[in-house]
Amino acid sequence: MLDTQRKPASVTPVVGAVKGRDLPDAGGAKTYLNGRLALLAVLLAVLAAVGAAAWAFYLRPVNVQVSQAERDVPVEVFGLGTVEARVASKVGFKVSGVLVDLRADVGDRVAKGSNLGRLDDREQSARVARTKASIAQAEANVQKATASVEKARANYNNAKRISERRQALVQSNSTSVEAAETAQAVQDAALGDFNLASSEVEVARASINDAKAQGLLESATLDFHTLTAPYNAMVIARTKELGSALGAGEPVFTLIDPATVWVLAYIDESKAGEINVGEPAQIVLRSQPGRRIAGRVARIEPESDRVNEECRVAVAFAQIPAEFTLGEQAEVYITTVRLTQPRLVPEAAIAGLGKGQGTVWTVEDGHLQQHVVTLGHRLLDGRHEITGGVPNDALVVSQLRSGLRVGRAAKVAGGKVP
């Protein structure tokens, strides 16, 4: 009987367990519901973000920059060089001597033939005076020889008449044969004297010519004691001063012809082949960085620098500046061709650039496309000319950005979707 009235020991714990786990009270149920709602909200937010990102990446039009249409664009080749003078001379005296006069200094402009300086010429002046005396003496000798010729001619004529009379007397036996032969001998001697006197005249005349030639030589040497400008020049250096003892040929001044000032520029050999003599150019002097001076290609030297692999190109000023400095650094921009209406794209916007080709993005009918294009000239600012591979109505993207995809809608920045 006691066993039948005993309650099972496990009934109460089971009921407690069911009560605590499966049947929460009102406060616990509310917390549980709030947690589920928060989780659902997070999931919805993530889904919304993913959807927005997907829409932004796949559906929303992307803003792009495109190249603008341009006209008459110059293609330039850049070079760096220095201001030089094509005609430059170091001038000095042809003879040695002491410098006693200087009439020019650095920066002076001198006309052709003007006096630049003089050596002590007293000794040479004496030589010139001596040659003049020699000429006068030679002229006197000519006069003396001429008088001797006249005397010899008179003696010969007299001896000839006497000989003729003696020869006639011999025929009539009025004189001896010996006397006739003596008269003939006197005549022959007189003829010899006449010929000798005539030769002495020629010798005297030759002496005059020699004296005059010597006089010209001494006069020229005297002229060498004076230094004159060989052309209209500018003095850029004076290396000697008064009282200096100079050797023959030692330079005193350095002259340039200011009309031949130009820029000798060095151009990369890869670009030098595009340049022709006479093409327009612009010169920027280092002392005037904000000014471009017009010029033209005057000479392309046939020999390149073997070390730097650069070609030397001379660019002449259209109008030489009034003030210039030889050796000053200068930039040259040579225009080799002008593009009438080019398609230009920055190098950074070209993918796979090489061997005159590359890939660019375009906007066509409001959507992005890609094209492999052929490239032409490259400008100094890094832009390339597109010569083929792009439809005529397409706009070329000039700045790459993320999100570019073939077929994606595109909107031109600052404008409407084409």
Image (cartoon, grey):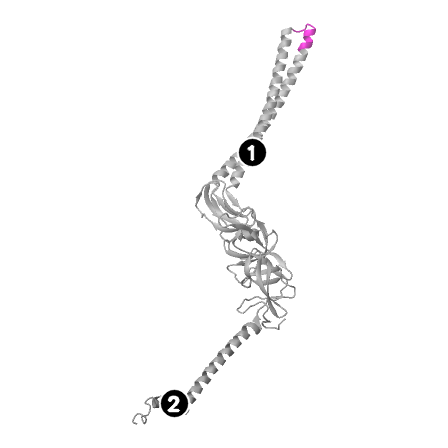
Q: Is residue 205 magenta?
A: no
Residue 144 on image: x %, y %: 58, 26
Q: Quadrant of residue 56?
A: bottom right
Amino acid type of the residue tagged 2 in the rendering? Lys
Q: Is residue 351 visible?
A: yes
Which residue is denoted by mark 1 in the rendering?
A: 213
Per the rendered image, the range of residues in magenta is 166-175
The structure residue drawn at horizontal position 61% and vertical position 22%, both measured from the top left corner, is: 151
Marks 2/1 in contact by CB < 8 Å: the verdict is no
If you read the primary sequence from the N terminus, does the residue marked by circle 2 or circle 1 appear first?
2
Instruction: Decide whether the magenta segment is chiefly helix, strand or loop.
Output: helix
Say which element carries label 1.
helix
86 horizontally vs 341: left or right: left
> Does residue 173 belong to the magenta stretch?
yes
Label annotation for residue 333:
none
Residue at 64% x, 20% y is: 154
**Residue 36 appears at what percent x and percent y?**
45, 84
* Residue at figure coordinates x 55%, y 36% from the top left: 216
Of the 4 image quadrants, the one containing the N terminus is bottom left
> Could you give the CA–CA distance between mark 2 and mark 1, rounded to whole angstroms?
149 Å
Q: Is residue 354 above or below residue 301?
A: below
In this view, the residue in front, 253 or 284, is: 284
**Residue 19 got which mark?**
2
